Image (cartoon, helix red, strand yellow):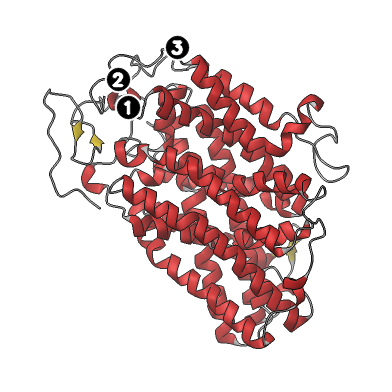
Amino acid sequence: MTATLPPVPPSVPGEPIVDPEGRIELAPGTVPADSPFVNDDLLPVPLERRRWTTYNFAALWIGMAHNIPSWLLASGLVALGMDWKQAVFTIALANLIVLAPMLLTGHAGPKYGIPFPVLARASFGLRGANLPALIRAAVACAWFGIQTWIGGVGIFTLLGKIFGGWAQAGEIGGQPWTLWLCFVLFWALELAIIYRGMDTLRRFENWAAPFVLVGAVVLLVWVAVKAGGFGPLLDQPSALGWGADFWPVFFPSLMGMIAFWSTLSLNIPDFTRFGAGQRAQIRGQSLGLPTTMTFFALLSVFVTSGSQAVYGEAIWDPVQLVAKTDNVFGLLFGLITVLIATISVNIAANVVSPAYDLANLAPRIVNFRTGALITGVVGVLIMPWKLTETPELYIFTWLGLVGGLLGTVAGILIADYWIIRRTVLHLPDLYLAGGRYWYTGGWNWRAVVAFVVGGVLAVGGSHSAPGKGPFPADGLIPLLEPLADYGWAVGLASSLVLYALLSRGVRTATESGRAGR
């Protein structure tokens, strides 16, 4: 909750302003307006604008977790041979694990009001922060394209069921032009919402989260009524068992499920910087992420099981299932739910971060809104729908590779903020060339070395089954092939330890003194 006492004014001119809850704000005029590392979107959020509550953060996660790709996670694991209990267990455990770095990196948001790329300046340097920021931005752009395409296909499918004939329209690039129209309109709607800013996003997530949750429960009730119970899917044994065949699938799948939200474990300060305090972000994220993802996985399994009883086949895609009904009201309700569900995750998870990251690259040229528009364009140019063609490509290759690299960055951020600096940052120097975070020419070689070593260890052994992916069967670096199944954990642990060792003695006497410096 928001502090009831006023902020404490600085005792020395130019010192940061500290409120009773320990949240810190830059004193006016501390950072020159013409600094090349400053724009309004990168500066700390003023204390009076840090008002996101526990509900806001919980609603954010509920809105982001309730989407078609997360619904399909369980089906991807079942397709790999797990039964529904193993799939739900894997998803639940992954989200409990990824919650830890989420809370650790999220701590800097309410305390300092800074976004992810500015936090990364403390460890990578003012210029070096562009390295993790651009990696995160590239991943987000690809995810934005994936989610937008899935949303466009959902709209196309349901509108085609309502009006008929859409699938028979003339083709452009191998797809009906009506599908491209749905994709473009959906893309434009997403960017229009985020272009209005973070307050608009907060209000949208506040009502979108419960709406989508109700929509998912309605789908479950509808299927259960039609089925008169649930189908044989719940009784299907695991094709892997719990023995030697299970673990080689479980560990890379666990890393893939972690990688699903590993992007947010980096840029969660982009949201927590608006938090009313640490309790709001800790409680909101703890209530919102692991519980919602586990519940949604269970929901997808039960609904799919019911579909098997009704239609004689397991229909994992909720859009295809809704399209089975001939009720116009049901189709329209499903269409609106798909729209809101996809928008709520896409603009929050995949537009906010690259907008800040691209602004960090050229603060004098690119602001938050410009970065959002660039994200939208790049997300289309990447043509990322190919990534979801098979579970092997989606879970092992795409999510595994992404998770390894982002886990490496997370390890460096956590080591720097918690181990080296003990959560104490000097706000003005995060925006000034020549300050304590300038290092050598704006780059901290320790972070770069830790990133390279951790990244090689995490993804160097990436491998694909013959004909199933882009990597050699024995791994890019055969010696590292055994580590590939644990990419996120290997990247996070190795970079954290190496950076901490390289950075011993870096923390200055000034930073160990007065809080907020």
Left or right of residue 49, residue 404 in this image? right
Q: Which amino acid, by three-letter code, is at mark 3?
A: Thr
Q: Residues within 10 Å of mark 2 (few under 14, many from 20)?
A: some
The image's mark for residue 424 is 1
Q: Quadrant of residue 509?
A: top left
Q: Secondary structure at mark 1?
A: loop
Q: Which amino acid, by three-letter code, is at mark 1?
A: Val
Q: Secondary structure at mark 2?
A: loop
Q: Are marks 1 and 2 in contact (CB under 8 Å)?
A: yes
Residue 233 in the image: above or below residue 100? below
Q: Which amino acid, by three-letter code, is at mark 2?
A: Ser
In the picture of the structure, the residue carrying the numbered disc 2 is 512
Residue 301 in the image: above or below residue 379? below
Q: Please state the horizontal and vertical placement of residue 345, each as a whole percent of the image.
A: 51, 57
The image's mark for residue 158 is none
In the picture of the structure, the residue carrying the numbered disc 3 is 440
Q: Quadrant of residue 200?
A: bottom left
